Structure formats: structure tokens, C-alpha cells
Amino acid sequence: MSSRTAVAGPDAEDGGPVRAAVASTPAQRERRKRIVAAATELLTELPYDSIQIRDVAARAEVALGTLYRYFPSKEQLFAVVMLEWSSSTDTALASPGHARVAEDQERLRILLRRTVRAFERHPNFVQVISVLGAATDPVVNEALGAYSDGFASAIAEAVPDVADDDVAVLVTLSNSLLDSLLRTWWLGRLPIRAVEDHVDRAVAVMFHGVARR
């Protein structure tokens, strides 16, 4: 079954995105929660492209049709998984120890290092970001936009003494840095300790510029 197979709805008829049914009752919200939890569990065990939607439904103990009512495509389901996982990660990043660090540079370095460690513990999420980043479904893009906004907010909180325009640059640089390094690590071309070393050096360059020979 294709990951884009979905229960037909009004949007499907006019070529627009297929949107999920709203979980409005406690029972519906519980079923939706079980589906997201099951997909998250499977993603900790298997690469994204090895996960079948029918396996998620079985793990969540719901009918396949029920799953598709709440998540009309595999991409929409895992976009929600990614967003909810990152929200829990953001909470861990905003720890008291992080807040006590005096320098913006060091706070940003800690934030990026913790992000790397989060993906080290859950490497299959690297593939999810790569796959979903190429999606054209606006529902998926909305979730990815929320994910990006959360990361940008975490960076802004880490560097309160940096001018707003420069915070935007730090967000862009940090996103590009982590995307490149984590993808290279996930492909087995770079050890995780080298990723951390690159992060440290890149943050130093962001704040102080390149070192001269």
C-alpha cells in the first residue's frame, strides 16, 4: 500500500490535500494518541521506510480505516510524530542548567549539542526529517513549519543578547549545520564525536569569525 493511500474526503475531490478528521470525543482523542504513540515506538525500532501503516494500526490496536481517518497519509502521521517528539526534546533543552550559563555562545553550543544527542538516541528521526522535507503536502509542511518555529524559538531564548536580525542568521546557520552533519552521520560517513566537534567549532566561528593562519 502506498504511503499516500488515504480515505477519500472533500479535499481529495478537488485536488487539494486530504485533511485528517478531528478527534472531538475523549474516545477519538485516545485512539489518535495511541496511533501517534505506536508510530513513535516503531520509529525507535525501524527506519522510516521500513514501517508499514498496517503495522502502526496493529500496534495501536485500531482498524486501518480508523488510522486513515486521523492520518490520511504516512507522511502526515510521521509529521505529527516528529512534531510531538521535538516538543518533548525542546522541554529537555530548556533545562535549569542551560539557563544558568552566562554566555550566549556557550548556551547555543549546549543547545546544539543536546540536539545532536537527541538524534543520536533516536537516529531514525534524521531520515524522517529528510523524507518529509521533500513532501509537497501542505498539511505536512504546516507541521514541519511548527517544528522549525520551535527550534528557532529555542535558539532565540539561548542567545538573548544577540540582535534580532542576527538571531535569524544564527537560526539559518544552525539549521543548515545540523542538517548537513546529522545526515552525514546517519549515512555512516562521520562519527558522532566528530559531529560534536564540528558543532563546537562552528559556534565559535559564528560568534568570533574564522581563525587566521
Image (cartoon, grey):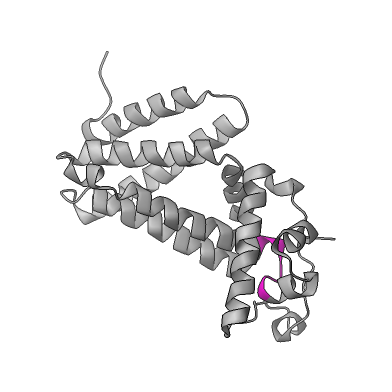
In this rendering, does residue 207 appear at all? yes
- Residue furthest to the top in view is 213
* In this rendering, position of residue 103 left or right of residue 195: left
Seen from the viewer's position, the closer of residues 42 and 171 is 42
Seen from the viewer's position, the closer of residues 93 and 7 is 93
* In this rendering, position of residue 94 left or right of residue 50: left
Q: Could you tell me which quadrant the C terminus lies in? A: top left
Q: Position of residue 178 (x, y in %)?
A: 45, 39
Question: Which residue lies at the image location 82% right of the left edge and 60% below the top edge?
Answer: 2
Q: Position of residue 41 (x, y in %)?
A: 63, 51
In this rendering, does residue 134 appear at all? no
> How many labels were placed on the picture?
0
- Location of residue 160 with respect to 178 vertically, above or below: below
* In this rendering, position of residue 74 left or right of residue 164: right
Question: Which residue lies at the image location 37% right of the left edge and 36% below the top edge?
Answer: 113
Question: Which residue lies at the image location 61% right of the left edge and 63% below the top edge?
Answer: 36
- Location of residue 15 with respect to 153 vertically, above or below: below
Seen from the viewer's position, the closer of residues 163 and 109 is 109
- Residue furthest to the right in view is 1
* In this rendering, position of residue 46 left or right of residue 24: right
Q: Which residues are magenta?
A: 70-75
Q: Position of residue 117 (x, y in %)?
A: 44, 36
Q: Position of residue 108 (x, y in %)?
A: 28, 41
- Decide whether residue 39 is among the magenta residues: no
Q: Could you tell me which quadrant the N terminus lies in? A: bottom right
- Decide whether residue 74 is among the magenta residues: yes
Quadrant of residue 187 within the rendered picture? top right
Seen from the viewer's position, the closer of residues 156 and 74 is 74
